[in-house]
Image (cartoon, rainbow, N blue to C red):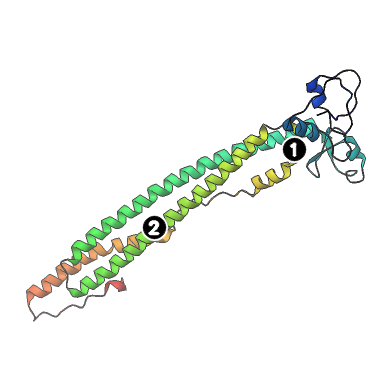
Amino acid sequence: QRCFLPPVQGTLSAKECQAQPATGKHCGNSQEIQPSDGQRAEALGRFCERHQEPLKLFCEDDRAPICVVCDKSKEHRDHKVIPKEEAFEAYQGKIQGHLEFLNKQKKEILASKLSGEAESQKLLKRTESERQKIMADFKQSHQFLEEQERLLLAQLKELDDGIKSCGDQHIAKLSEEMSSIDDLIKELEEKQKQPATEFLQDIRSILQRCHENKAVDPIAFPPGFKKRIEKISKMHPFLETAMKEFKDIVLSGPQEKKRTFPGLADL
């Protein structure tokens, strides 16, 4: 296969010939070469597809590399255009800034995830403690108290389910966000390895995804869980007092005026 590259003066090496833009004309070199797909793509990426001129400039308005002919065209006449090297350096700085922010955000999410798991265990431990107290108290009570026991245990079960559900949802959301950030970090790191022209070609899309990234709410559990646990926790001293008074009334005989105890639901 012949090398169809622009004719040049003198004799080019195979490597130099491969680096020239393809125009469909024979370059005139004595040595026939066959550029690789990667070399051909790299060579084409350095030149304007419309004007076949080197992409030496960068349009800030369109955030895309352009050639000197594009710069003079009506399309870019009123746009801010800077040298490609200057744009490369500037956007490298922006990408680096996003990388630093994302890595910091990743650490914060991981810390929040660990904190959420610890808080979940702490809350579940409290509910288990209250469960044991309530069960011990109601074993000494009448059928009425046994019914109240079932109600309270149902509330604790509801709290357990709510805590686990909130914890699982929060951890899943954190894991999803961390996975998304990992993907974005990997993409940005790969982007930094690209040559200037390829690096700048889709910079707008990448920066937009970076700006659209939102931090996750670090609050794993609504404050209502703690309030409901505290409310149930207050039942324990009440049950002890109620049981003592109930025993005193029973042991004192039927002549004593019986006291009516409020239902637990009234507390």
Real-space CA distance between mark 2 and mark 1, rounded to the nearest whole angstrom: 47 Å
What amino acid is found at the position of numbered circle 2 in the picture? Answer: Ile
Residue at (73, 34) in percent of width and height: 90
Numbered mark located on residue 163 in the image: 2
Q: Quadrant of the N terminus?
A: top right
Above or below residue 145? Residue 170 is above
Mark 2 crowdedness (10 Å alpha carbons): few <14, some 14-19, many ≥20? many
Residue at (18, 77) in percent of width and height: 259
Residue 146, position as x, y percentages in the image: 21, 71
Q: Earlier in the sequence, mark 2 or mark 1?
A: 2
SS category of the residue bearing label 1: helix
Q: Nearer the viewer, residue 265 or 164?
A: 164
The quadrant in which residue 11 appears is top right
Residue at (74, 30) in percent of width and height: 36
Numbered mark located on residue 200 in the image: 1
Q: Is residue 41 left or right of residue 124?
A: right
Mark 1 crowdedness (10 Å alpha carbons): few <14, some 14-19, many ≥20? many
SS category of the residue bearing label 2: helix
